[in-house]
Amino acid sequence: MHCMTYGTRHVRTISREPPVDPPNMLARTFARTSARFGTRTLATRMPIVGGNWKCNPKTPEEVPALIDNINACDTSGCEVYVCPSPLHVGLVQGKLTSGAVVAPQNCNFTGCGAYTGEMAVDQMAAMGITWVLIGHSERRGEFGLPTPKESNELLATKLKYILDKGLNCVFAIGEPLPIREKGLDAVLAECVEQLKDVKDLLDPARVVIAYEPVWAIGTGVTASPEQAQETHAAIRAWIAKEVSPAVAEGIRIQYGGSANAKNAPDLSAMPDIDGFLVGGASLKPEFADIVAAIAKAKA
Ligand code: PEP
């Protein structure tokens, strides 16, 4: 671990090499001091909320209203990113005025070339894009259609490529309902299966984990705050043991699965929930309320 100074801020980072062109939001990640949580002392993690528009909206004419929802967010106490559909990335990049950033919903595992239908990290970097989302359950095979599943091995290759190219990554994981029904140990085992190939890449300054129980995504069923907390805490404990206590302490774990303005305050009160990955509600003005809820809870 070493210190880097961005502007006037002193930033703790665990990167072995400084990222290419570090964005402001990265600089703020570790700009917070220690705070007490119950009997534990935690390094406060800057909250982070992302809006995943998935394959929405239908027309380009609808994009500006969605951009307005993102620009309405107060990002002074919470980092914000938005994941437009691939076709709309270029309509959003350059239009965000509140400090939020664009994070495409997927990327390729290598550079430009003969990869029909793909989006290269290199193209994103050239567009000034600094974050990318990978590993969403809808890309891991929970798509409702027999499209090829993205394997843990492929996602590890993608994450390495993203970091090598100087971008930052939201890495999504989560279990389907039959695993949740077996209990927390089974849930953790599934999360570990999805994390073990990338454990050496978990740089808290550049990687955010999005824990999204598949059974809660788009269903209107949210994990209870206690359920989400115990899972986040279990993931963090595994990282502490398998990577290091410093990485576990620093890495941000977002909750995803029917998060909305109503349930965000209670979920935000949980010590190991550092933000949200939001699908449906990110298409609505209430997205700004979710950002405000976690910023307030972690202030
Ligand atoms: C998601 O797409 O990552 C998601 C969490 O969706 P929703 O909020 O609609 O459940």
Image: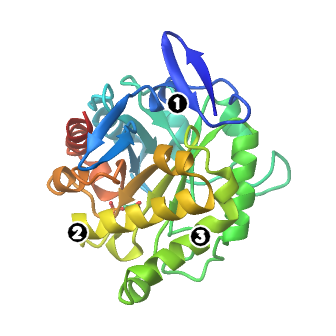
In the visual, does 110 lie left or right of 227?
Answer: right
Residue 211 at what x, y percent from top left? 43, 62
Residue 55 numbered mark, or none: none
Mark 1 or 2, nearer chain start: 1
Q: Quadrant of residue 126?
A: top right
Kindly check if marks 3 and 2 are in contact, taking CB atoms under 8 A apart as contact.
no
Per the image, the residue denoted by label 1 is 26
Per the image, the residue denoted by label 3 is 194
The residue positioned 38% from the left and 68% from the top of the image is 231
Q: Is residue 41 above or below residue 244?
A: above
Mark 1 or 3, nearer chain start: 1
Q: Quadrant of residue 177?
A: bottom left
Residue 107 at what x, y percent from top left? 66, 52
Residue 5 visible to an observer of this rendering: yes
Per the image, the residue denoted by label 2 is 224
Residue 215 at what x, y percent from top left? 36, 77
Q: Is residue 224 above or below residue 240?
A: below
